[in-house]
Image: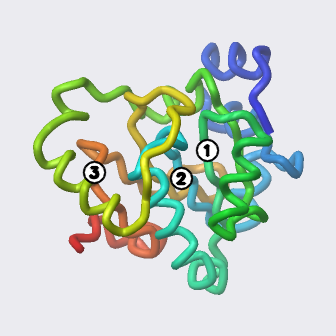
Amino acid sequence: MRLSKSSLATMESVASLDDVLKSVEDQYHSTLYEISNSAPTLVVFLRHFGCCFCKEALSDIHDCVSSLQASGVKIVLVHMAEEDEAATLLASYGLADLSRISSPDQGLYRYFGLGRGTADKILAPKVISRAFEALLHGHAIGPFQGDTMQMPGAFMIHRGRIVRSFVPESVEMRPDYVGIASGAMYAVAR
């Protein structure tokens, strides 16, 4: 579901996490507040859909979704694309049924403290090296769909509270989603 302009204006003018979580809905019309009150919820903020790291993240989520769901964790994906584009891409990774929220003007990203990278960080040698690794594993770069400078992140939310967060310093950092969900805060070194 896409955030409406009134939802974004409301979100940016409020200070309460509860208000923000109550103002955004997934494609099933459930709010983040409702989802996080029903179960611990891993909210993954994705980069633009043309990014090889975003595609790598979707592949990683696909690989661990059964394990996370078996442990009672719900997953919500936040992206910057239109709903139909998101539905198509997520279906290609076997993630069509996961809750998803579109935030094309990045209001939800900003609220959670996820800023934009800088050209020197996005084009750093370690980022380019990791991009080649992702490309070699089949995560192709595609057309830019969203802000190419937007940073990703992941947050565990339960009962309307952020209980853990993973905010990477640069775009090539590969989170361990199971570790984040279970409380181990580290990136996967592969």
Q: Quadrant of the C terminus?
A: bottom left
**Residue 96 drawn at (x, y percent):** 75, 62
**Residue 162 drawn at (x, y percent):** 51, 50
Disc 3 marks a residue whose amino acid type is: Glu
Location of residue 129 with respect to 120 vertically, above or below = below
For the point 57% across and 53% down, which residue is it? 43
Q: Which residue is mark 1?
A: 78
Residue 44's disc number: 2
Residue 7: quadrant of the picture: top right
Distance from Cα at disc 2 to Cα at disc 3: 15 Å
Q: N-terminal of the two: label 2 or label 1?
A: 2
Q: N-terminal of the two: label 1 or label 3?
A: 1
Disc 2 marks a residue whose amino acid type is: Val
Residue 172's disc number: 3
**Is 76 or 15 nearer to us in this picture?**
76
**Is 17 or 5 nearer to us in this picture?**
5
**Residue 118 drawn at (x, y percent):** 25, 24
For the point 62% across and 61% down, which residue is it? 41
| Horizontal relation, residue 144 to residue 183: left or right | right
- The answer to whether mark 1 and mark 3 are in CB contact below 8 A is no
Q: N-terminal of the two: label 2 or label 3?
A: 2
- The answer to whether mark 2 and mark 1 are in CB contact below 8 A is yes
Tell me the SS state at disc 3. loop
**Residue 49 drawn at (x, y percent):** 54, 43
For the point 64% across and 31% down, which residue is it? 103
Residue 82: quadrant of the picture: top right
Disc 1 marks a residue whose amino acid type is: Val
